[in-house]
Amino acid sequence: MEPAQWLADYRDRLERAAHGARQAQESLREAGATARSPRGEVTVSVTATGALDGVSLTPMARRLEAEALAELIVATAREAQRQAASRTTEVMAGYLGDNAALTQITRHVPAEVVR
């Protein structure tokens, strides 16, 4: 292969990789999740990394004892985090494929989330 052709092919591969990375980054921005408690007292939003983004309580939440409300908030946050981890895993699997890099990214994700 001619050096000029090799360089052009290499440049094309780099451009495709950069485009894929930009698409994955955009998808990850949208991979956060929101979960609502079964009766709707609590809503929790998290980012794609599972970081808490927001908590809202309805007037029904005031009827709960403090300990029950705290447990409901934590359970709802865990569900939102599970959803976000699932979405993030899907995005990264689409970008990376099933390989060692994906394994490194998902090694701390609960087993039921990872495909």
Image (cartoon, rainbow, N blue to C red):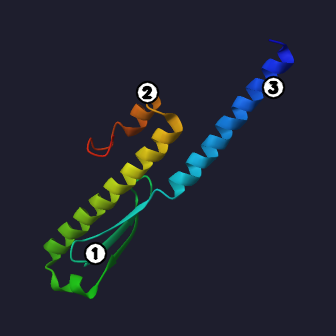
Q: Earlier in the sequence, mark 1 or mark 3?
A: 3
The residue under label 1 is: 42
Q: Quadrant of residue 64?
A: bottom left
The 10 Å Cα crowd at callout 3, few under 14, some 14 to 19, many 20 or more, is: few
Q: Decide which of 109, 112 is in the foreground and name it.
A: 112
Q: At label 3, which amino acid type do we have?
A: Ala
Q: At label 1, which amino acid type do we have?
A: Val
Residue at (49% x, 41% y) in the render: 94
Q: Are marks 1 and 3 in contact (CB under 8 Å)?
A: no
Distance between the alpha carbons at the discs numbered 2 and 3: 29 Å
Q: Earlier in the sequence, mark 2 or mark 3?
A: 3
- How far across and down, in percent of the image, does residue 33 sit? 40, 62
Distance between the alpha carbons at the discs numbered 1 and 2: 38 Å
Q: How many marks?
A: 3
In the displayed orientation, state which residue is furthest to the bottom. 59
Element type at marker 2? helix
Q: Decide which of 53, 111 is in the foreground and name it.
A: 111
Q: Quadrant of residue 75?
A: bottom left
Q: Earlier in the sequence, mark 1 or mark 2?
A: 1
- How far across and down, in percent of the image, does residue 36 sit? 29, 71
Q: Quadrant of residue 16?
A: top right
Labelled disc at residue 8: 3
Mark 1 vs mark 3: give the one in front. 3
Answer with left or right where residue 12 lies relative to residue 20.
right
Residue at (25% x, 69% y) in the render: 73
Residue at (16% x, 76% y) in the render: 66
Mark 2 vs mark 3: give the one in front. 3
- How far across and down, in percent of the image, does residue 23 sit? 60, 48
The residue under label 2 is: 100
In the displayed orientation, state which residue is furthest to the top. 1
- Residue 35 lies, with reference to residue 83, above or below; the image says below
